[in-house]
Image (cartoon, rainbow, N blue to C red):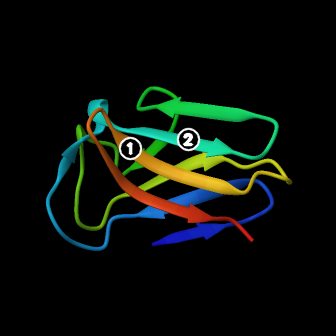
Amino acid sequence: MMASTTDNVTLYHKGSDWVRAADLEVIVSNATATRKYRSDMFVLSPEKQVFDLGSSIVVPYQPGDRQVRLVMPRAVLFSGEVR
């Protein structure tokens, strides 16, 4: 699940397996730019080493960004559009 404001995008873990935060990357992009956020650049709440049930990730959002993806080295965990 994803929520957005004019300042950030929040990704929520609503179920399934846990994932090591160090393995995650959030990619925010539009037609002209791509921004990548690794675990040392996003806010993981609660602050711990894994992204699991009840956790959330917050990254900055700039107007005009459209696509948000949560990825691991070999998998896309989430892909969605910000409106």
Q: Is residue 68 left or right of residue 7?
A: left
Q: Pick out the residue farthest to the left.
A: 17
- Of residues 17 and 32, the one nearer the viewer is 32
Q: Which residue is mark 2?
A: 27
Label 1 element class = strand
Identify whether 40 is placed above or below 8.
above
- Identity of the residue drawn at 52% across and 69% down: 2
Identify whether 19 is placed above or below 2.
above
Amino acid type, label 1? Val
Label 2 element class = strand
Q: Position of residue 50 (x, y in %)?
A: 22, 44
- Identity of the residue drawn at 38% across and 44% down: 71
Q: Is residue 26 left or right of residue 5?
A: left
> Alpha-carbon neighbours of circle 2 within 10 Å: few (<14), some, or many (≥20)?
some
Label annotation for residue 71: 1
Q: Position of residue 30 (x, y in %)?
A: 75, 47
Quarter of the image with the N terminus in it: bottom left
- Identity of the residue drawn at 64% across and 55% down: 67
- Of residues 39 and 63, the one nearer the viewer is 63
Quarter of the image with the C terminus in it: bottom right
- Identity of the residue drawn at 50% across and 51% down: 69
Q: Determine whether label 2 and label 1 are within 8 Å by CB.
A: yes
- Rounded to the nearest angstrom, the CA distance separating label 2 from label 1 is 8 Å
Q: Position of residue 27 (x, y in %)?
A: 55, 41
